[in-house]
Image (tube, grey):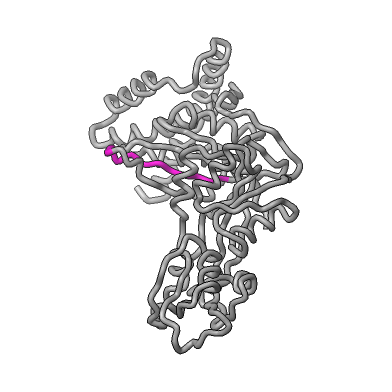
Amino acid sequence: MDLQALRAQINQLDETILSAFAQRMTICRQVGVYKKENHMPVFQKDREDQVIQRIRDMAPPDMSQSAAALFAAIMDISKCYQQQVLADASWMPSFQQVKTLSCARAGCQGTRGSNSETALRMLFPGAEAKFYATFGDVCKAVGSGEIDFGILPIQNTTTGTVIPTYELLHQQVGYIAATVNLEIRHCLAIRKDMDPAKLTTVCSHPQALQQCSGFLRESGLEQLSYSNTATAARFVAQSPLPYAAVCSPRCAEQYGLRILRPDIADAMENVTKFICFSKECLIPEQADTISIIAELPNRAGSLSRMLNKFAANGLDLQKLESRPVADGSFDVRFYLDFSGNVLDPRVNALLADLAGSLSEFRFLGNHQTLG
């Protein structure tokens, strides 16, 4: 038998499978209606385990695992389909939809001249800016109502994830309402009266130092970490020591420093993403990105099954960041961004499915990117 004949047989079998799949989904819809009328959850773990084990037992020994994986995917698609029938939004926190974001007070970590302040001004040009010593202090200020919005860096195109921000997100510091992308430019700045030949040490935030690692390695300067680039610049401006700061040109100007070397970052395209978050869940009308936390067990196929649900609903996954749960289980906590709006039935179906089937699920916000 030649290849074309074999492919013709496969095509016939595919048509049979498709017909059976369509019939199964029709019945699944009826099951969804029944669950809705009887106030039953879509996810029935015992039933799902029974179906998968039955398939394993029925399949040829060398295909049992593959057959189980196939039917697990079919059941995940079925659950998403049933969620659309139920239109259950009980997973969703109460929220307010707004045309635009505005506030009287916003806060960030650091001091005047920092990149965080620049991001804050991009979002809220007329707001009163308040500055805090740590990321955690910004979150506490949001929680207490001292400020309306907090601004924190979350990712850089050169050095990657800002891990402390993710750890704070897991503690439910609030809801993300917007993100802003800020182009980062680093320069080497010194006091105007300092002799560059006597320079011994450079100060800045650890990520800024890392982003300029090539230049700094060649310079041979000792490196000191500070909590913020602007804090480092302010220290250099006020200190008699032969120190320089890695900071933005705007920050150097703010503190009266002289730019000794401009544009010292390793990468020409150096962008940091900042999140803007609030205590209450605010969703801009133009929100197009959803952020969630999903915790998965250390079990074969768990990540694949979750990702298949995005494909089944036709939703584009933008980012997947993993962190260990740190409880000795080797389970993994994922931070996900995907395209969508909570008013879309497909999005609601996916989130309802995840909320009902994961050991931990957290909705972090439906936001838009500004700038």
Quadrant location of residue 327? top left
Looking at the rendered image, the quarter that the C terminus falls into is: bottom right
Q: Is residue 330 magenta?
A: yes
Percent x, y for residue 299?
31, 37
Classify residue 52 as left or right of residue 92: left
| Residue sitting at the far top | 38
Quadrant location of residue 287? top right
Report the front residue among 74 and 362: 362
> Which residue is depicted at the point 55% across and 27% down?
91
Relative vertical location of residue 353 with respect to residue 27 in this rendering, above or below:
below
Quadrant location of residue 139? top right
Classify residue 121 as left or right of residue 90: right
Classify residue 212 as left or right of residue 365: left
> Which residue is depicted at the point 55% across and 83% down?
260
The answer, for residue 22, to whether it is visible in the render is yes
Q: Count the labels in the image.
A: 0
The answer, for residue 308, to whether it is visible in the render is no
> Which residue is depicted at the point 63% across and 28% down?
94
Report the front residue among 42 and 276: 276
Percent x, y for residue 222?
38, 76
Percent x, y for residue 251?
61, 69
Relative vertical location of residue 334 with respect to residue 236 in this rendering, above or below:
above
Report the front residue among 285 and 50: 285
Give the dominant element type of the magenta stretch: helix, strand or loop. strand
Percent x, y for residue 273?
57, 57
Q: Is residue 76 magenta?
A: no
Relative vertical location of residue 308 with respect to residue 110 in this rendering, above or below:
above
Report the front residue among 28 and 248: 248
> Which residue is depicted at the point 58% across and 60% down?
111
What segment carries the magenta color?
Answer: 328-338
